[in-house]
Amino acid sequence: MAKKVHIPVQLIIEHGAIRNFDQTKVYEWLKDSRVLLISGSGKTRTVTEKIENAIGQQASRIEVLSCQNNSLDTINELERQVLEDTPDIIIGIGGGKALDVSKVVGTRSNIPVILFPTAISSDAICSPVAVIKMLNKSTSIGVKMPQAVVIDLDILDSCPPRLMSAGIGDLLSNKTALLDWELAHHAGKEEMNTFSNLMANNAVESFMNVLNHPSPDRSQLMKGAAEALIMSGIAMSIAGSSRPCSGSEHLISHALDYHCGAKALHGEQVAIGVLVAQHLQGKKQEVESLLPYYEKLGLPTHYEDLGYTREEMHRAIRQAPTMRSRYTILNEFTLTDDEIEQILDEVYPQEAKNRYRLTVG
Ligand SMILES: [Zn+2]
């Protein structure tokens, strides 16, 4: 039985994407349209102004609403304004929260969404999942895929290296997530979608190829990471869930958020979780070590680099399987406190501290 898969109709990843926007198909869509820009705060406002200027001649009306956070209250308020005066197209501009909020508002009001990510700190830049805050708890919900994604590499260039590093952490997690998915499939807990699996694996492999180039520059890395994160989003769209890109390492990150104060970026926490997932998976079968890539990129290799204590990291590993009902490598062990302590010793040795700085590009 054929399945319908939603992917963005247009994908633009280039330098000067906003400056040259009037030469694109996406620009043509905006002709005589009422356009709502949902903008993140801070530096994103400047990007929003650039986009406003770029589409000023084409749209019949442009309205800008700012989005300070991804809470349900913010989403309800924006949705109320959208329903009172319905635009033809929503453009989401920001690093993460504004993109998630735009996807949710667009889905709930049935309006097509175009995303202009200003950072690539996670695979949310083009995924059928959005994170929203309800009752002080972050929850992932399913949303429609964006119609187009426009990434201006000049904007990413001025973005703090830490954000791209986090995005790459989120990308590398495809490896452990896919192995968890296979374990779930073998345990009879979940169906496997081979095409989605292939796509998510190719996403991370294609980025590793860029990284393995003798001397990749920052621009190649940014483009490679953006393309790979978008492919990950499409793999999720094919699977109909975040499964190909979210396994035990994400459960550990969710536990750090929920039980230990959410002190770091999503992709950074996921990168820390990948090391535990990989360690446990290695006890069951041969797995590729991702550590050389961490060293190459300067990704965090110790929880203390992200501000967590040993006790908090212990708690996160303990609580991870309870974060959602998703079968992973964590279900194949019944870890005692002593065993968790041993994992902490082996996965995060003293010398793993303070390696955290982006070393390439
Ligand atoms: Zn993620």
Image (cartoon, grey):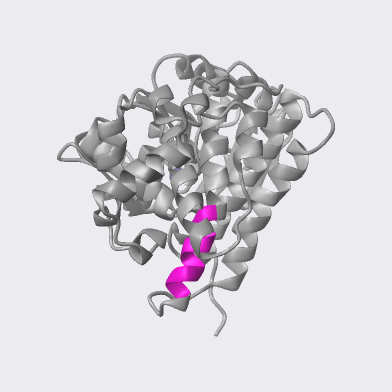
Give the image quarter of residue 256.
top left
Q: Nearer the viewer, residue 32 or 155?
A: 155
Residue at the far right: name it: 214
The stretch in magenta equals: 176-185
Residue 309 appears left or right of 18: left
Count of numbered circles in the view: 0
Residue 81 inside the magenta-drawn segment: no
- Residue 250 in the image, given as x and y percentages of width and height: 40, 48
Residue 332 falls in which quadrant of the image? bottom left
Task: State the residue in front, 136 or 49.
Answer: 136
Residue 318 seen in the figure: yes
- Identify the residue shown where x is 47% and y is 69%: 183
1 up-or-down from 237: above or below? below
Q: Residue at x 48, y 65 (%)?
A: 181
Magenta stretch: dominant secondary structure? helix
- Which quadrant does ligand 1 occupy? top left
Given residues 183 and 236, the one toward you in this image is 183
Quadrant placement of the C terminus: top right
Taking the spot 31% from the left edge, 24% from the top edge, the residue there is 68
Tell me residue 73's x, y (percent): 19, 36
Is residue 177 covered in magenta?
A: yes
Q: Is residue 104 visible?
A: no
Please provide percent x and percent y for residue 242: 44, 57
Direction from residue 288 to residue 80 in the image, left or right: left
In-front residue for pair 295/16: 295
Percent coordinates x, y for residue 300 in the rendering: 50, 29
User: Quadrant of the image for the N terminus?
Assistant: bottom right
Q: Residue furthest bottom?
A: 1
Q: Of all residues shown, which one is farthest toward the left?
A: 135
Rendered view: 39 above or below 320: above
Report whether 232 appears left or right of 153: left
